[in-house]
Amino acid sequence: MFKSVLTKIIGDPRERELKRTEPLVDEINDLEPEFEKLSKEQLQALTAEFKDRIASANREQKAVLAQTKKEAREASESDLRNRLEQEAQKLEKEIRQEEEDILREILPRAFAAVREAAKRTLGQRHFDVQVTGAIVLHEGKIAEMKTGEGKTLTATMPLYLNALT
């Protein structure tokens, strides 16, 4: 009884999650006609485009990070080494955050590309529930799905997106 009262007050967490991800799922769905028109080569070229966008966004930061790590390894003074290691950790965190921001931006196009690739190669199209599950997985959360709802196909979207980094 307490659970039903609580659910009435704060709502069903699954329903809230569906409402939160619905605009993103709609955006991915809206891209489907555009992606259906792409040739095989154009669809494949999207991966390079996505990777280039990520790489060019933090190329300088990665070079600074590599130099900082090198200096930390070569430092003979422990205070200097510790300071450089802390600076390297800070740079790594900034790079990860920038990559996450870019992934968030390209997510709709990347997921639409995976959906189209799955349709062409496997003859399987990601349904909205699978796209929702993919968004949730990309965010590092657990997506509960029933038997037969296509967890394997769902996982292809966040796997592809995160492999771009």
Image (cartoon, grey):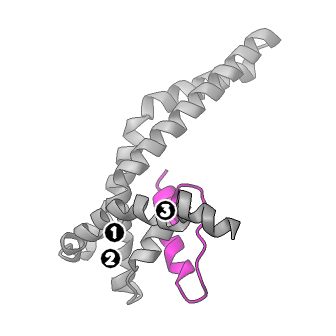
The three-letter code of the residue at mark 2 reads Glu
> Circle 3 sits in a helix, a strand or a loop, which is it?
helix
Q: Is residue 51 found left or right of 4 in the rendered image?
A: left
| Front-most of residues 6 and 110 | 6
- Of callouts 2 and 3, which one flags the residue occurring earlier in the amino acid sequence? 3
State the separation of the CA atoms marked 2 and 1. 5 Å
- For the point 43% across and 42% down, which residue is it? 101
The image quadrant where one finds the N terminus is bottom right
Q: Which mark is residue 157?
A: none
- For the point 62% across and 69% down, which residue is it? 4
Report the residue marked by disc 2.
Answer: 116
- Of callouts 3 and 1, which one flags the residue occurring earlier in the amino acid sequence? 3
- For the point 33% across and 68% down, which residue is it? 112
Report the residue marked by disc 1.
Answer: 113
As displayed, is residue 112 above or below residue 77? below
Report the residue marked by disc 3.
Answer: 17
**Start and end of the magenta stretch?**
136-165
The three-letter code of the residue at mark 1 reads Ala
- Is disc 2 in contact with disc 1, using a CB cutoff of under 8 Å? yes
As displayed, is residue 67 above or below residue 8? above
The three-letter code of the residue at mark 3 reads Glu
| Front-most of residues 164 and 67 | 164
